Amino acid sequence: MNKNVVKIGLMGLGNIGVGTYLVLEKERETIKKNTGVDFEIVKVLEKYVDRVRPVNVPLNKFTQDPDEIFNDPEIDVVIELLGGLHPATDFMLRAMEHGKHVVTANKAAVAHSYELLRETAEKNNVMFRYEASVGGAIPVLTALTNALQANRFEGVYGILNGTTNYILTQMTDFDMSYEEALQLAKDKGFAEPDPTADVEGHDAANKLSILISLCFGERVRPAGIPTKGITKVTKEDILEAAKSGYKIKLVASAQMVDGKLEYSVKPTKLPFSHPLASVSNELNAVYVQASEAGELMFYGRGAGPLPTGSAVMGDVIEIGKAIKKNAAYDLVVAGGKRE
Amino acid sequence: MNKNVVKIGLMGLGNIGVGTYLVLEKERETIKKNTGVDFEIVKVLEKYVDRVRPVNVPLNKFTQDPDEIFNDPEIDVVIELLGGLHPATDFMLRAMEHGKHVVTANKAAVAHSYELLRETAEKNNVMFRYEASVGGAIPVLTALTNALQANRFEGVYGILNGTTNYILTQMTDFDMSYEEALQLAKDKGFAEPDPTADVEGHDAANKLSILISLCFGERVRPAGIPTKGITKVTKEDILEAAKSGYKIKLVASAQMVDGKLEYSVKPTKLPFSHPLASVSNELNAVYVQASEAGELMFYGRGAGPLPTGSAVMGDVIEIGKAIKKNAAYDLVVAGGKRE
């Protein structure tokens, strides 16, 4: 089989769905030139057909019935961008059972059902990739599981949530209160109307759960990670830390201490000289200590329609290349397995 | 074919060769667990058999005859760590012609003979990988060519040479002259006895040539890159820049300006707030502007036996996984092609 058009079923046309659609539209020629493969989104599962969006999706691509995607023999890859646990997890499993490769940006679903999703992918001999679920555009999962396969990880430390990093940066740089900075983040679109999942650290805990699985081969569910958000951080805390040469960041960390894995999400004082201390505003970064490579940091946009769409399409393209070569080269995530 | 031991011929047992050998020895169990593949270095081309080294290589593995590696049907992968253009380039080509996959850390050879090496790999249906040639342990080539395939690159900016970054950091932080900082770098092992290739920018130009090929699909030989080193930078220059909020770094850059690619290696003033400005001492980093992903930075150790060995083994492992699956999934470099 030498397949030059890979057909995609897209589930969800919210912000990230629109971003993914746009990236494919804008970069079709780049992708074709880089890979020799063309991609086409042939069906879109989305109930709000009439919503005004910055993309022009032909009406005949819309469906309200997920079975139209599962049962379409032409569809090779399902992109799940519904978010949340249900029905997203079930839809991914069903797609795999129908022989579709699956790509998602859904950190909650991956964090909660990691083994089940991977096992179902393996059992059905399909690829399952989720680079966009941690760090948005930053190709950190690929790096951790491919290029660094000859390393044990000693520690992983992430600024994994753009909302909280934006708020803390504003509090630090402009002497704002938490409430003032939160309001500004809402005004700028960096915080949701209900920011709980971000400011209480749950979003970061989902992402840390995934990083722990990949780096340490241990399964820790998000609810099992001691998690403290930033709602109690005051501008006095920040000022006092600064006097001693520290910045306060919401750090999601996991590290081996005497052979035992310790992990948490919490506001953390980082010395000014630490590479993570200079990660400002809505940017994200992951810093790792690896046994042979030493210290590494990966930095970039952790959210937003186009950056996230870039990561989703990166995964889709890897699958497309494998389909083209008829080589299910790497089942499951970007590269190696860490368990 | 389902091959569980991948056999390696190693060319060169200098610092990087020793580092690679050590990484494989130390991480054999990690690698086996991550990938299900075992690796064995079965022959080592090296004339100085008796040199004292921090690894214990059995005497019967040494050879002085490269044909013993080319003609050994058991050897799947040749790691070229001789450095320099000759005979390294010729040895890589001959290895490919004998059906061996090739991994190298040799930036000079890759920069000078990029097309020939890639074409020869394709013609012989073998994989050719060189992640370690740019940025040492930092998996930047993999990131640029895999995860970011749905992007056009607008600019690539690297601190690609640890020696010069160490010298400039010492001059900046401790008010040293160039000569004092160079001497310190030599004492600490961050500069060679003859530091010309580093301090004049030629090493960075080699690496930039490779980045240009991968990011922009253009071939610019290192000699065609306007290159200025750091030997004329004074502590007064650094002080004056600091007064206006800038740090001086040796930046290798390539960017699209009105549809035309501009490139250079030269001492460059970066605002304190630029992510590259906080890359200190011997550390390296690559900062890119991508059309969809936005800004990204990859940071880590650009040199040293273990970090470089980590990157070499990362490439070897990718090849081993492909051999195991009998799938030459990605010919040539880590992932896509950019031309």
Image (cartoon, coloured by chain):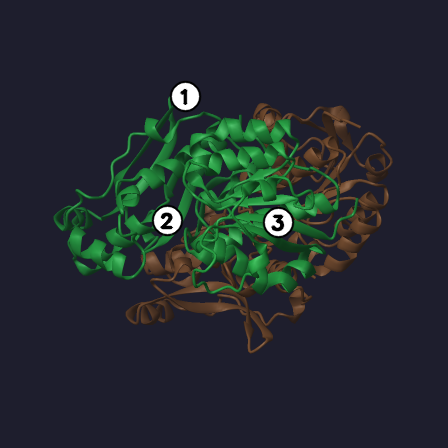
Chain colours: A green, B brown
Does residue B304 lie above or below A189 as drawn?
Answer: above
Residue A284 locus on image (x, y percent): 38, 50
| Pointer 3 local density, CA inside 10 Å: few below 14, some 14–19, many at least 20 | many
Q: Is residue B137 visible?
A: no
- Give the foreground label among 2 and 3: 3
Q: Residue A297's x, y, as percent?
A: 44, 46
Please give the chain letter of the residue carrying mark 1: A
Distance, label 2 to label 3, CA atoms, is: 39 Å
Task: Report which residue position mark 2 lands on.
Answer: A275
Secondary structure found at label 2: helix
**Residue B6: x percent and y percent?**
73, 29
In this rendering, position of residue B68 left or right of residue B82: right
Q: Earlier in the sequence, mark 2 or mark 3?
A: 3
Q: Are marks 1 and 2 in contact (CB under 8 Å)?
A: no
Which residue is disc 3 drawn over? A8
Q: Residue furthest left?
A: A236
**Towards the viewer: A139 or B63:** A139
Of the image marks 1 and 2, the number of the one nearer the N terminus: 1
> Which residue sits at x=40%, y=26%?
A220
Label annotation for residue A259: 1
Chain to which the residue tagged by mark 2 belongs: A
Q: Secondary structure at mark 1?
A: loop
Is B292 situated left or right of A244 in this image?
right
The residue furthest bottom is B258
On residue A17, the disc is: none
